[in-house]
């Protein structure tokens, strides 16, 4: 059977602010672990967040550059999950009331121009960084609370090459407007890819698999191409695609299962009671 790939990308871009999203801690890359932290980004009881105005301005600039519609009133929400690099036990993000929606980005692949839809651009804070060794795991919370925009793309991409080109153009836009340094190696521009396949000509979407935190354009293209081939082989053999999150092993050129995929209800989103609505 002939299959068609359906790909949507979620990009997390660190905003070029001197301080974090909700506190005055610096955002300098490469500082000694756990030295750029305070009671707010450590999630200590009683510490209250204060929104960084420059982060808002950069986020709005991003949405305008991607032709999004701005909403005058939006809200921050708590995205609840438990992991050592998330000291509060939740991440401040936006959910059902983002500050922008319905944009697009023009890309050209193989001489053909396409307009790729953007569902929304919203603000959120970053988590810390866990590093796993054979004998122990360690956590650095310097990145916890750093201001991000998440750019959620529509499932309009149809090939690994299109996805890689979309990321290149998006990175160029963000660097040009001065909101992101485009540094994939340092993690300030990161991508998650949602990949599914369906019989050619069918409108119904297949079961999607998320590829997590891939940090180069070449790796994104290779990971998506491999995942399309893997899902095709599973279906051709009479198997079933499982909704899950997978990682990319560059040395072996394969994706591997990380965990079952969460849905929105698993995060128990609710409006953050410590932050007022954002009014632009």
Image (cartoon, rainbow, N blue to C red):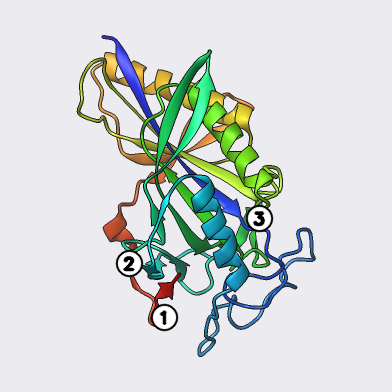
Question: Alpha carbon of mark 2 to alpha carbon of mark 3: how far?
Answer: 35 Å
Q: Is residue 112 left or right of residue 15?
A: left
Q: Position of residue 212 (x, y in %)?
A: 50, 42
Q: Position of residue 155 (x, y in %)?
A: 36, 34
Element type at marker 3?
loop
Disc assigned to residue 135? 3
Query: Mark 1, mark 2: which one is toward the viewer?
Result: 1
Judge whether 13 appears above or below 79 on screen: above
Q: Quadrant of residue 230?
A: top left
Task: Locate the C terminus by quadrant.
Answer: bottom left
Q: Position of residue 35 (x, y in %)?
A: 75, 73
Q: Are marks 2 and 3 in contact (CB under 8 Å)?
A: no
Q: Which residue is mark 1?
A: 276
Asked if residue 215 can be seen in this view, the reply is no
Judge whether 113 appears above or below 177 on screen: above
**In the image, what residue occupies the spot 62% across and 68% down?**
54
Query: Mark 3, mark 1: which one is toward the viewer?
Result: 1
Q: Which residue is mark 2?
A: 269
């Amino acid at each position: 059977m002939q299959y068609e790939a359906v790909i949507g990308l979620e990009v997390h871009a660190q905003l070029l602010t001197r301080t974090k999203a909700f506190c005055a801690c610096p955002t300098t890359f490469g500082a000694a672990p756990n030295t750029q932290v305070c009671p707010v980004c450590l999630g200590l009881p009683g510490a209250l967040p204060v929104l960084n105005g420059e982060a808002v301005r950069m986020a709005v600039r991003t949405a305008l550059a991607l032709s999004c519609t701005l909403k005058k009133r939006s809200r921050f929400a708590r995205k609840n999950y438990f992991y050592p690099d998330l000291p509060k036990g939740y991440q401040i993000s936006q959910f059902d009331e983002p500050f922008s929606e319905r944009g697009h980005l023009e890309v050209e692949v193989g001489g053909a121009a396409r307009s790729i839809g953007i569902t929304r651009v919203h603000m959120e804070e970053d988590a810390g960084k866990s590093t796993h060794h054979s004998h122990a795991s360690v956590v650095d919370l310097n990145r916890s609370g750093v201001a991000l925009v998440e750019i959620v793309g529509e499932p309009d991409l149809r090939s690994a090459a299109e996805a890689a080109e979309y990321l290149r153009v998006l990175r160029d836009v963000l660097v040009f407007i001065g909101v992101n340094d485009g540094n994939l190696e340092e993690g300030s521009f990161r991508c998650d890819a949602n990949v599914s396949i369906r019989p050619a000509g069918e409108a119904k979407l297949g079961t999607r698999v998320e590829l997590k935190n891939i940090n180069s354009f070449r790796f994104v293209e290779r990971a998506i191409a491999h995942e399309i081939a893997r899902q095709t082989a599973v279906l051709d053999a009479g198997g079933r695609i499982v909704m899950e999150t997978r990682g990319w092993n560059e040395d072996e050129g394969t994706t591997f299962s990380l965990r079952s995929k969460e849905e929105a209800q698993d995060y128990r989103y609710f409006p953050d009671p410590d932050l007022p609505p954002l009014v632009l």
